Amino acid sequence: MTWKEKMKEFGGGNFTFISTDGETLTFIVVGEPVLLTSKFKGKEQDRIGCPIVSDDGYQLFITGKRLARKLAKQESVFATNAIMVVRHGVEGDVNARYDVRVLPEPETYARLKAIKDADFTPELIQESIDEATQVLGER
């Protein structure tokens, strides 16, 4: 069994965050955003779940509203381009910045689209929302 398969078995494998400085995520968007509630440092906050496909397959990318608004500005290219997000800021830094880049090369989009076509079904979105809601509520 692979690490990815084990993590899905353990839970938490259906969603992702980017939380460390310099961490990147390259993906295509495969669904509408969803509003989630979590606790961070004892304080309730809204998070946005973005249904994506990366090289790891389908995941719900959980992020804050600032980054979600940046992603929304790129909605016109969701059906043709991959997106790369880069985090700038240490773990736990609420003032972290995120670069959002539209990747121009068609090969990246085609590779991720092939993963989507092979592995993604719309039912996965609700499964990942349910799992993320449970884990976020436990924090």
Image: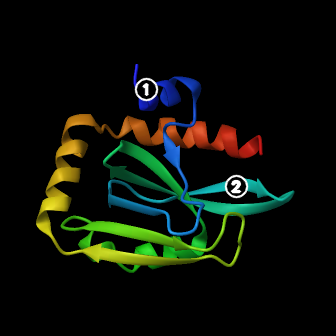
Quadrant of the image occupied by residue 134 = top right
Tell which circle, 1 or 2, labels the residue nearer the N-terminal end. 1
Closer to the camera in the image, 125 or 56: 56
Residue 73 sits above or below residue 90 on the image: below
Count neighbours of disc 1 (C-alpha within 10 A) and say few if under 14, some if 14 to 19, many if 20 or more.
few
Q: List x then y, in percent, for residue 14.
A: 48, 39
Q: Quadrant of the N terminus?
A: top left
Closer to the camera in the image, 92 or 60: 92
Residue drawn at (14%, 56%) of the image: 110
Count neighbours of disc 2 (C-alpha within 10 A) and say few if under 14, some if 14 to 19, many if 20 or more.
some
Q: List x then y, in percent, for residue 40.
A: 78, 58
* Residue hosting label 2: 37
Quadrant of the image occupied by residue 43 = bottom right
Q: What residue type is labelled 2?
A: Thr
SS for dot 2: strand
Residue 69 sits above or below residue 5 on the image: below
Residue drawn at (54%, 59%) of the image: 18
Give the Cα distance between marks 1 and 2.
27 Å
Q: What residue type is labelled 1?
A: Glu
Residue drawn at (35%, 40%) of the image: 122
Q: Which of marks 1 and 2 is in front?
A: 1
Answer with left or right where residue 54 lies relative to residue 79: right
Q: List x then y, in percent, for residue 105.
A: 15, 70
Residue drawn at (52%, 30%) of the image: 7
* Residue hosting label 1: 5
